[in-house]
Image (tube, rainbow, N blue to C red):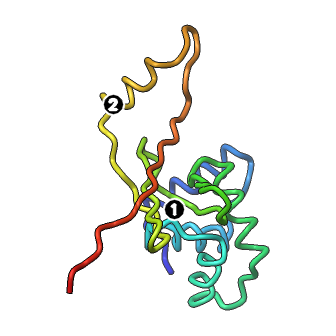
Amino acid sequence: MKLATTAKRALGEALGQAKQRSTRQREHVFAVLLDKRDHPTADEVYARARTTMPTISLATVYNCLETLVSCGLVRQVNIEREPSRYCPNLREHAHFHDLRSGRVLDIDVPTDLITGLKRLLPAGYEAEHIELSFRGKAPTSKA
């Protein structure tokens, strides 16, 4: 799996700022996350990564994910008692957790709504990040 030039540059810059180096495994895991933006778990990332890099280990995938999160390239999404999921969407957005399928979807949130939510904070407080999530069920298809 090949990482696009702009993504490779962003990865290199973020890793450099964190005094980390770019490795084939980090590039590969990042490419897996960018390829299908469906909030996979570490196990799902591992399964996908192995299709084109069969020698990668689960421990390496976990280490790569931890590095990508700490460098600010990926967000860790935690939904109650489920395994962590990983989201490469760095824009302010919400998540919808479908209770039927288990899927997690990105929900774009208008900037004015984010600004309004930040105004709700006590005087002098500043939010660096807002985590907004919805839980519910997608409509059932009628066959």
Please report contact status of discs 2 and 1: CB closer than 8 Å, yes or no. no
Q: Which corner quadrant of the image does residue 98 belong to?
A: bottom left
Residue in the image at 51% along x and 62% along y: 8
Q: Is residue 22 left or right of residue 111?
A: right
Describe the element under mark 2 as helix, strand or loop.
Answer: helix
Residue in the image at 46% along x and 63% along y: 104
Residue 39 location (% of width, % of height): 51, 65
Q: Is residue 17 left or right of residue 93?
A: right
Instruction: Name the one closer to the observer, 109 or 49.
Output: 109
The type of residue carrying mark 2 is Leu
Residue sitting at the far left: 143
Describe the element under mark 1 as helix, strand or loop.
Answer: helix
Up the image or down, 135 lies above or below 28; here it is above
Instruction: Name the one closer to the observer, 9 or 92.
Output: 92
Residue in the image at 57% along x and 90% along y: 51
Residue sitting at the far top: 123
> Which residue is the site of mark 1?
8
Residue 100 location (% of width, % of height): 44, 72
Q: Which corner quadrant of the image does residue 11 belong to?
A: bottom right
Name the quarter where the C terminus is drawn: bottom left
The type of residue carrying mark 1 is Lys
Mark 2 residue crowding within 10 angstroms, few (<14) / some (14–19) / many (20+): few
Mark 1 residue crowding within 10 angstroms, few (<14) / some (14–19) / many (20+): some
Residue sitting at the far right: 59
> Which residue is the site of mark 2?
113
